[in-house]
Image: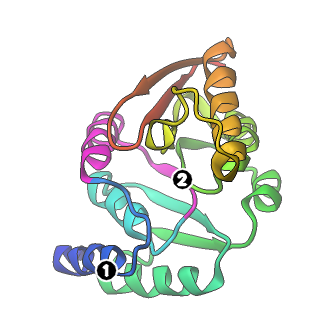
Amino acid sequence: MFHQNELEKVKTKALQDHIPILMDETLETIKQILEKENPKKILEIGTAVGYSASQFVHFAPNATVDTIELDENRAKQARENVKNIGIENQVNILIGNAVEILPTLQEEYDIIFIDANKGKYPIFLKEGIRLVKKGGIIIADNILYKGYVLGDYNKHKQRTAVKHLREYIQLAQEDDRLETRILEVGDGLAVSYVKK
């Protein structure tokens, strides 16, 4: 039984604690994709407190979500949250570094959602292409990163993230196996349809 009110609590608390969660506008776009595709298996890179994974199950009730989180405390929180929402049987939280976990996965996923360390996005894309089924979709959030990625931003603090996000966009747009659109919703969303 999906407890919508518990999901709202997760959102409120995450916002209070300044934990980055999906923006409503981004969520609306993802909702449309999930309702259209009706995926069975979703992989999420970057669980945080389980808000997005819970929303994925909400929009795609037949799906199971494997989600990877580096921070043990957040993973613990996420586990509690999905239990309270009533979907612990549909959300499998893997704790550890996605760069190390991804190569060990052998499943095929309908949809892969990337929302983790910006500096590692190109690695996540490479693994995503390997793990997504033909006709599947890879979605990357925060791809425009406060507008820095398309501008001539070069401040030292964010330079690495911006560089790797630009690289991600280039790889996603130049790879023949992908058809990629960059959507200016929220903080930017890259949606890649996989033809491989």
In the image, is residue 158 part of the stretch drawn in magenta? no
Q: Tell me, yes or no, whether the two marked residues, 2 and 1, touch with CB atoms within 8 Å.
A: no
At x 21% / y 74%, what residue is drawn? 8
Q: State the SS at label 2.
A: loop
At x 45% / y 49%, what residue is drawn? 40
Residue 33, percent across and down?
Answer: 33, 36
Three-letter code for the amino acid on which mark 1 is drawn = Gln
Query: From which residue to which does the magenta span run?
Result: 24-46
Residue 194, percent across and down?
Answer: 57, 24
At x 51% / y 51%, what residue is drawn? 42
Residue 161, percent across and down?
Answer: 66, 46
Q: State the SS at label 1.
A: helix
Instruction: Determine which quarter of the picture holds residue 34.
Output: top left
Which of discs 2 and 1 lies nearer the camera? The answer is 1
Residue ID for mark 2: 115
Residue that extends furthest to the front in the rendered view of this protein:
155
Which colour scheme appears in the figure?
Answer: rainbow
On screen, 111 above or below 84? above
Q: How far is mark 2 from mark 1, CA to CA?
A: 20 Å
Kindly identify which numbered label has been placed on residue 16.
1
At x 43% / y 63%, what residue is drawn? 53
Crowdedness near tag 1: few (<14), some (14–19) or many (≥20) residues, C-alpha within 10 Å: few
Does 194 sit left or right of 63 as displayed? right
On screen, 57 above or below 187? below
**Residue nearer the viewer, 69 or 41:** 69
Decide whether the magenta segment is chiefly helix, strand or loop.
helix
